[in-house]
Amino acid sequence: MRKIISYQSFPVSYLVEGEGLPAMLIHGFAEDWHIWENQIRYLSKHFKLICPDLPGSGQSPYNESLSTVEELGGCLPLILDAEYIASCAVIGHSMGGYAALAMAEKWPVRLQALGLFHSTACADSEEKKEARRKGIAFIESHGSHDFVRQSIPNLFSEMFKNEHPGIISQLVNRYNNFNPLSLVSYYNAMMVRPDRTRVLKVLRKPVLLIAGDEDKAVPIAQSLQQSHIPDLCYFHILTGAAHMGMIERTNLSNAILENFLSEVLT
Protein backbone atom coordinates (compact mmCIF):
# COMPACT_ATOMS: atom_id res chain seq x y z
CA MET A 1 0.00 0.00 0.00
CA ARG A 2 1.34 3.39 -0.99
CA LYS A 3 1.05 6.13 1.61
CA ILE A 4 2.04 9.79 1.91
CA ILE A 5 3.25 12.03 4.70
CA SER A 6 3.98 15.74 4.65
CA TYR A 7 7.59 16.76 5.22
CA GLN A 8 8.52 20.44 5.13
CA SER A 9 5.27 21.15 3.26
CA PHE A 10 6.07 18.60 0.52
CA PRO A 11 4.57 15.12 0.12
CA VAL A 12 6.83 12.12 0.73
CA SER A 13 5.59 8.83 -0.65
CA TYR A 14 6.35 5.43 0.81
CA LEU A 15 5.27 1.83 0.40
CA VAL A 16 4.14 -0.49 3.18
CA GLU A 17 4.01 -4.21 2.46
CA GLY A 18 3.63 -7.26 4.67
CA GLU A 19 2.96 -7.91 8.32
CA GLY A 20 5.19 -8.68 11.26
CA LEU A 21 8.18 -6.97 12.78
CA PRO A 22 9.13 -3.79 10.90
CA ALA A 23 12.11 -3.00 8.69
CA MET A 24 12.80 0.02 6.51
CA LEU A 25 14.52 -0.34 3.13
CA ILE A 26 15.96 2.90 1.73
CA HIS A 27 16.86 3.18 -1.95
CA GLY A 28 20.00 4.77 -3.32
CA PHE A 29 20.97 7.46 -5.82
CA ALA A 30 18.86 7.72 -9.00
CA GLU A 31 16.51 5.01 -7.69
CA ASP A 32 13.19 4.70 -5.87
CA TRP A 33 11.52 1.99 -3.79
CA HIS A 34 11.14 -0.25 -6.86
CA ILE A 35 14.82 -1.14 -6.61
CA TRP A 36 13.82 -3.42 -3.69
CA GLU A 37 11.03 -5.24 -5.59
CA ASN A 38 12.71 -8.65 -5.35
CA GLN A 39 13.27 -8.21 -1.62
CA ILE A 40 9.76 -6.90 -1.00
CA ARG A 41 8.17 -9.94 -2.64
CA TYR A 42 10.27 -12.28 -0.53
CA LEU A 43 10.57 -10.52 2.83
CA SER A 44 7.02 -9.21 3.08
CA LYS A 45 5.92 -12.77 3.87
CA HIS A 46 7.61 -12.42 7.26
CA PHE A 47 8.13 -8.70 7.95
CA LYS A 48 6.39 -5.36 7.66
CA LEU A 49 8.46 -3.45 5.12
CA ILE A 50 8.50 0.35 4.89
CA CYS A 51 10.09 1.55 1.65
CA PRO A 52 10.25 5.33 1.18
CA ASP A 53 10.85 7.37 -1.92
CA LEU A 54 13.35 9.91 -0.62
CA PRO A 55 12.48 13.54 -1.44
CA GLY A 56 13.17 14.05 -5.14
CA SER A 57 12.80 10.38 -6.05
CA GLY A 58 9.88 8.34 -7.35
CA GLN A 59 6.58 9.79 -6.21
CA SER A 60 8.22 12.23 -3.75
CA PRO A 61 8.73 15.59 -5.48
CA TYR A 62 11.97 17.51 -5.43
CA ASN A 63 12.33 20.04 -2.62
CA GLU A 64 15.08 22.58 -3.26
CA SER A 65 15.36 23.41 0.45
CA LEU A 66 16.77 19.94 1.22
CA SER A 67 20.48 20.21 0.52
CA THR A 68 22.09 17.66 2.84
CA VAL A 69 21.82 13.94 3.50
CA GLU A 70 20.65 14.79 7.00
CA GLU A 71 17.76 16.87 5.63
CA LEU A 72 16.81 14.19 3.10
CA GLY A 73 16.72 11.60 5.86
CA GLY A 74 14.68 13.81 8.16
CA CYS A 75 11.50 12.32 6.71
CA LEU A 76 12.37 8.80 7.87
CA PRO A 77 11.39 9.08 11.56
CA LEU A 78 8.22 10.88 10.50
CA ILE A 79 7.29 7.89 8.38
CA LEU A 80 7.82 5.64 11.39
CA ASP A 81 5.62 7.97 13.43
CA ALA A 82 2.88 7.70 10.82
CA GLU A 83 3.07 3.91 11.07
CA TYR A 84 3.14 3.98 14.89
CA ILE A 85 6.54 2.28 14.89
CA ALA A 86 8.86 3.17 17.75
CA SER A 87 11.93 1.49 16.24
CA CYS A 88 12.86 -0.89 13.46
CA ALA A 89 15.77 -2.20 11.43
CA VAL A 90 16.91 0.39 8.87
CA ILE A 91 18.78 -0.80 5.77
CA GLY A 92 20.02 1.53 3.07
CA HIS A 93 21.48 0.94 -0.36
CA SER A 94 24.35 3.26 -1.33
CA MET A 95 23.04 6.81 -0.77
CA GLY A 96 20.21 5.27 1.25
CA GLY A 97 22.88 3.99 3.62
CA TYR A 98 24.10 7.56 4.10
CA ALA A 99 20.57 8.59 5.07
CA ALA A 100 20.34 5.59 7.42
CA LEU A 101 23.61 6.59 9.08
CA ALA A 102 22.40 10.17 9.53
CA MET A 103 19.24 8.81 11.12
CA ALA A 104 21.27 6.53 13.37
CA GLU A 105 23.37 9.47 14.52
CA LYS A 106 20.46 11.80 15.30
CA TRP A 107 17.74 9.33 16.32
CA PRO A 108 19.55 6.17 17.50
CA VAL A 109 16.56 5.01 19.56
CA ARG A 110 14.54 4.63 16.34
CA LEU A 111 16.86 1.88 15.08
CA GLN A 112 16.94 -1.70 16.29
CA ALA A 113 19.65 -2.46 13.75
CA LEU A 114 21.48 -0.76 10.89
CA GLY A 115 22.25 -2.18 7.47
CA LEU A 116 24.62 -0.75 4.86
CA PHE A 117 24.00 -2.44 1.50
CA HIS A 118 26.84 -1.44 -0.83
CA SER A 119 27.29 1.66 1.31
CA THR A 120 29.90 3.19 3.59
CA ALA A 121 30.25 5.32 6.70
CA CYS A 122 33.29 7.09 5.23
CA ALA A 123 33.10 10.56 3.80
CA ASP A 124 33.89 11.12 0.13
CA SER A 125 37.53 11.11 -0.82
CA GLU A 126 38.77 13.94 -3.02
CA GLU A 127 38.83 11.50 -5.93
CA LYS A 128 35.19 10.58 -5.29
CA LYS A 129 34.19 14.23 -5.03
CA GLU A 130 35.83 14.98 -8.35
CA ALA A 131 33.92 12.10 -9.96
CA ARG A 132 30.67 13.51 -8.58
CA ARG A 133 31.53 16.98 -9.91
CA LYS A 134 32.03 15.47 -13.35
CA GLY A 135 28.69 13.75 -12.99
CA ILE A 136 27.02 17.07 -12.15
CA ALA A 137 28.60 18.72 -15.19
CA PHE A 138 27.37 15.88 -17.40
CA ILE A 139 23.82 16.10 -16.02
CA GLU A 140 23.73 19.87 -16.49
CA SER A 141 25.00 19.53 -20.07
CA HIS A 142 23.17 16.41 -21.27
CA GLY A 143 20.24 15.88 -18.90
CA SER A 144 19.17 12.93 -16.80
CA HIS A 145 18.23 10.64 -19.69
CA ASP A 146 21.77 10.39 -21.07
CA PHE A 147 23.25 10.33 -17.58
CA VAL A 148 21.13 7.39 -16.42
CA ARG A 149 21.69 5.53 -19.68
CA GLN A 150 25.44 5.86 -19.12
CA SER A 151 25.63 5.37 -15.36
CA ILE A 152 23.31 2.46 -14.59
CA PRO A 153 25.18 -0.20 -16.60
CA ASN A 154 28.39 0.76 -14.77
CA LEU A 155 26.82 -0.32 -11.48
CA PHE A 156 26.72 -3.97 -12.56
CA SER A 157 29.40 -6.59 -13.09
CA GLU A 158 30.45 -7.30 -16.65
CA MET A 159 29.09 -10.84 -16.45
CA PHE A 160 25.67 -9.67 -15.29
CA LYS A 161 25.50 -7.02 -18.02
CA ASN A 162 26.32 -9.60 -20.67
CA GLU A 163 23.87 -12.20 -19.35
CA HIS A 164 20.95 -9.90 -18.45
CA PRO A 165 20.81 -6.94 -20.85
CA GLY A 166 17.03 -6.85 -20.53
CA ILE A 167 17.20 -6.09 -16.81
CA ILE A 168 19.65 -3.26 -17.43
CA SER A 169 17.36 -1.83 -20.12
CA GLN A 170 14.35 -2.00 -17.79
CA LEU A 171 16.19 -0.03 -15.12
CA VAL A 172 17.38 2.58 -17.61
CA ASN A 173 13.84 2.99 -18.93
CA ARG A 174 12.44 3.26 -15.41
CA TYR A 175 14.82 5.98 -14.24
CA ASN A 176 15.82 7.90 -17.37
CA ASN A 177 13.24 10.62 -16.66
CA PHE A 178 14.67 11.31 -13.20
CA ASN A 179 14.51 14.96 -12.21
CA PRO A 180 17.99 16.34 -12.99
CA LEU A 181 17.68 18.84 -10.15
CA SER A 182 17.31 15.93 -7.73
CA LEU A 183 20.38 14.17 -9.12
CA VAL A 184 22.53 17.29 -8.79
CA SER A 185 21.20 17.93 -5.29
CA TYR A 186 21.98 14.35 -4.25
CA TYR A 187 25.53 14.59 -5.58
CA ASN A 188 26.11 17.85 -3.69
CA ALA A 189 24.63 16.36 -0.51
CA MET A 190 26.85 13.29 -0.71
CA MET A 191 29.96 15.37 -1.27
CA VAL A 192 29.47 17.39 1.92
CA ARG A 193 28.35 14.57 4.21
CA PRO A 194 30.72 13.94 7.15
CA ASP A 195 32.57 10.79 8.05
CA ARG A 196 30.27 8.68 10.22
CA THR A 197 32.46 5.72 11.05
CA ARG A 198 32.09 6.66 14.72
CA VAL A 199 28.35 6.04 14.44
CA LEU A 200 29.07 2.38 13.74
CA LYS A 201 30.76 2.16 17.13
CA VAL A 202 28.56 4.30 19.36
CA LEU A 203 25.23 3.05 17.98
CA ARG A 204 25.55 -0.14 20.06
CA LYS A 205 23.16 -1.95 17.74
CA PRO A 206 23.75 -4.83 15.31
CA VAL A 207 25.20 -3.68 12.00
CA LEU A 208 24.91 -5.47 8.67
CA LEU A 209 27.45 -4.79 5.93
CA ILE A 210 26.90 -6.24 2.47
CA ALA A 211 29.69 -5.76 -0.07
CA GLY A 212 30.17 -6.80 -3.68
CA ASP A 213 33.56 -8.12 -4.64
CA GLU A 214 33.31 -6.25 -7.97
CA ASP A 215 31.87 -3.03 -6.54
CA LYS A 216 33.82 -0.02 -7.80
CA ALA A 217 31.59 2.53 -6.06
CA VAL A 218 32.21 1.12 -2.55
CA PRO A 219 35.39 -0.98 -2.64
CA ILE A 220 35.23 -4.22 -0.70
CA ALA A 221 38.41 -3.31 1.19
CA GLN A 222 36.65 -0.29 2.67
CA SER A 223 33.68 -2.38 3.78
CA LEU A 224 35.97 -4.99 5.28
CA GLN A 225 37.82 -2.34 7.26
CA GLN A 226 34.56 -0.95 8.63
CA SER A 227 33.35 -4.40 9.63
CA HIS A 228 35.75 -4.28 12.60
CA ILE A 229 34.21 -1.11 14.05
CA PRO A 230 30.78 -2.18 15.41
CA ASP A 231 30.50 -4.29 18.54
CA LEU A 232 28.34 -6.73 16.58
CA CYS A 233 28.72 -6.85 12.80
CA TYR A 234 27.27 -9.21 10.21
CA PHE A 235 29.54 -8.98 7.18
CA HIS A 236 28.70 -10.61 3.84
CA ILE A 237 30.46 -10.59 0.48
CA LEU A 238 28.42 -11.08 -2.67
CA THR A 239 30.77 -12.75 -5.12
CA GLY A 240 30.35 -11.74 -8.72
CA ALA A 241 28.31 -8.69 -7.75
CA ALA A 242 29.17 -5.04 -8.20
CA HIS A 243 26.99 -2.26 -6.73
CA MET A 244 23.54 -3.79 -7.28
CA GLY A 245 23.65 -7.03 -5.34
CA MET A 246 19.93 -6.97 -4.57
CA ILE A 247 19.46 -7.58 -8.31
CA GLU A 248 22.69 -9.34 -9.27
CA ARG A 249 22.48 -11.86 -6.43
CA THR A 250 18.80 -11.74 -5.53
CA ASN A 251 18.42 -15.09 -3.79
CA LEU A 252 21.53 -14.69 -1.67
CA SER A 253 20.64 -11.10 -0.79
CA ASN A 254 17.16 -12.18 0.26
CA ALA A 255 18.54 -14.94 2.45
CA ILE A 256 21.07 -12.62 4.10
CA LEU A 257 18.42 -10.00 4.84
CA GLU A 258 15.94 -12.56 6.13
CA ASN A 259 18.47 -14.14 8.48
CA PHE A 260 19.66 -10.76 9.74
CA LEU A 261 16.19 -9.40 10.37
CA SER A 262 15.09 -12.63 12.05
CA GLU A 263 18.02 -12.41 14.45
CA VAL A 264 17.97 -8.71 15.33
CA LEU A 265 14.27 -7.83 15.45
CA THR A 266 12.50 -8.46 18.74
Image: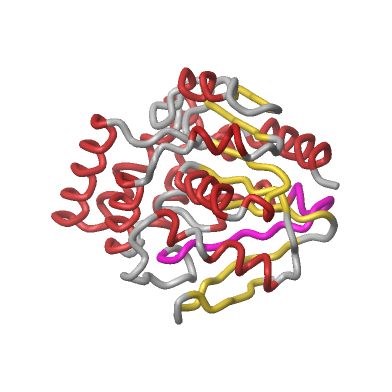
Residue lying at the far front of the rendered structure: 202
User: Residue 260: x and y, percent?
Assistant: 75, 36
Left or right of 52 in this view: 129:
left
Which residue is drawn at the image coordinates 40% and 65% (left, top)? 56
Left or right of 20 in this view: 68:
left
User: Residue 180: x and y, percent?
Assistant: 28, 61
Query: Is residue 115 shown in magenta?
Result: no
Looking at the picture, does residue 24 appear above or below residue 177?
above
Residue 66 figure quarter: bottom left
The quarter in which the N terminus is drawn is bottom right
Left or right of 166 in this view: 237:
right
Looking at the picture, does residue 76 appear above or below residue 139?
below
Looking at the picture, does residue 166 appear above or below residue 122?
below
Could you say which is closer to the camera, residue 27 or residue 251? 27
User: Residue 162: x and y, percent?
Assistant: 44, 29
* Numbered range of the magenta stretch: 42-56
Which residue is drawn at the image coordinates 21% and 53% (left, top)? 139
Which residue is drawn at the image coordinates 58% and 34% (left, top)? 200
Q: Is residue 90 visible?
A: yes
Rendered image coloring scheme: secondary structure
Residue 232 figure quarter: top right
